Amino acid sequence: MRTTDTIAAAMVSFRLRLAAWLVPVAVLSLSTGIASGEGRVIAVSVNSIVHPITGEILTHAIDQARRQRADLLLIRLNTPGGLLEATRQAIETIVASPVPVVTFVTPSGGRAASAGFFLLESGDIAAMADGTNTGAAAAVLLGGQQMDPTLRKKVDSDAAALLRSLASKRGRNADLAEKAVFEARSFSDREALENKLIDMVALDEPHLLAQLDGRAVVRFDGRRETLRLFRPQVTDYSPTIREQILSSIADPNIALILLILGALGIYVEYLSPGLIFPGVAGGIALLLGLSALSVLPINWIGAALLLLSFAFFVLEAKFASHGILATGGVVSMILGSLLLVNGPPETRIRLTTALTVALPFAAITLFLLSLVVRARAQEVMTGVAAMQNAIGVALTTLSPTGKVLVRGEYWNAVSATPIMPGASVRVIEVQGLTLVVEASK
């Protein structure tokens, strides 16, 4: 009996020890399971005009998402539009992404207009925050010129075909998407949702990710994936130094300001050689401006007008044109600035920017020229010409030769009439190392 009780007690003790060991293991397994269910999201922002750097940033963000085995790439959109070719490149990058892509117009009050509407429709899931808008995707001729009906139809048809392809493949309203091109239609977040241009509306980013958890996504190639975004870890893409610099100066207005400041610095160095700093700073600013403009489509007529304006300012420093060349330089600079960038309105240089850089440039140029003119008008204070009519003192008797002190220097002198020591003399001619003088009255 005692043996049976002993065995029972041992079994109970073993079970208790087993339970004490299994409970932590079970808790650890549960926590590990939860952790493995956490989603990883790479987020990247498009907050300015769409240009070639935009496509480069998206490409690198997708590469980062692939390397880190992210469950989702989130593209935050808040853009007025941009260049059509750059937009096509960005769309190709998004469509080819191995990671599901969600395009999200954010924050409230933001927009995805023109080229931004194309990017919005290219995502596997398109979403908008409350109080945002999209659309207005009508094409604009380069340089802002008026299109003839045939060209307008060709450009609009090409853009509409791209939108139809994207919207149809994503199961969205392709017919209404076309109207954003042909009729320049715009849509609020609610209108876009009700008309099936987008897939959802969210209050903010956490609300969006909560809605996406467990949602099935049909990729562009037909593959079906389910998003696992329990407790999502959002990591912002960090642009490279090159991308940061080019993105910050890619605005054509900023690029123009850098270009003009650079030209002004070099111009000041040209007028006053040896200052060094204006030339160094001007060279750096000029190269930064040219780098920014290199990613934008350039109208060479505008570039030629800018070069002509600089030539006019340089010639003004050489010839006394009474401001005619400087005025021509201002007009050429303003016209060249307005025509410099070929693109839709959001990528062009504004008139206010052109006036802001051209008028101060002209004012500074005229000020520097006035200093040059005054310097040229002053009497020469060095060399042989400076000795003409200079006043000195006779150190010895001049009869006819002797010594004089002129401007702190001892000279041999000759005079047609005798001059006593200490008398004031005036230089009337310089003959080699001898001064011809006369008594000063």
Image: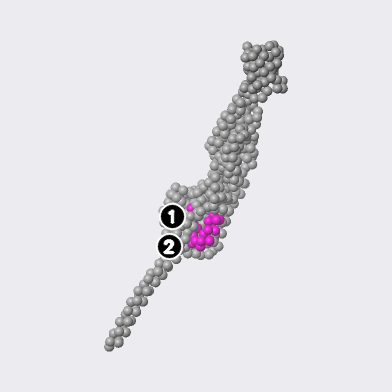
- Give the number of the disc on residue 196: none
Query: 321 left or right of 230?
Result: right
SS for dot 1: helix
- Image quadrant holding the C terminus, namely top right
Q: Which residue is mark 1?
A: 205
- Camera-nearest residue between 303 and 279: 279
- Camera-nearest residue between 366 and 352: 366
Q: Is residue 363 above or below residue 211?
A: above
The residue stretch that appears in magenta: 58-76
- The x, y position of residue 309, in whole percent, is 62, 35
Q: Is residue 21 visible?
A: yes
Q: Which residue is painted at 49% across and 49% down in the image?
A: 78
**Rendered image quadrant of residue 264:** top right
- Give the number of the disc on residue 230: 2
Q: Which residue is painted at 51% across and 51% down in the image?
A: 46
Q: Which residue is painted at 53% across and 46% down in the image?
A: 248
- The x, y position of residue 428, in whole percent, is 68, 16
Q: Amino acid at mark 1?
A: Glu
Decide which of tag 2 and tag 1 comes sooner along the chain: 1
Spatial CA span between label 2 and label 1: 14 Å
SS for dot 2: strand
Q: Amino acid at mark 2?
A: Phe
**Rendered image quadrant of residue 418:** top right
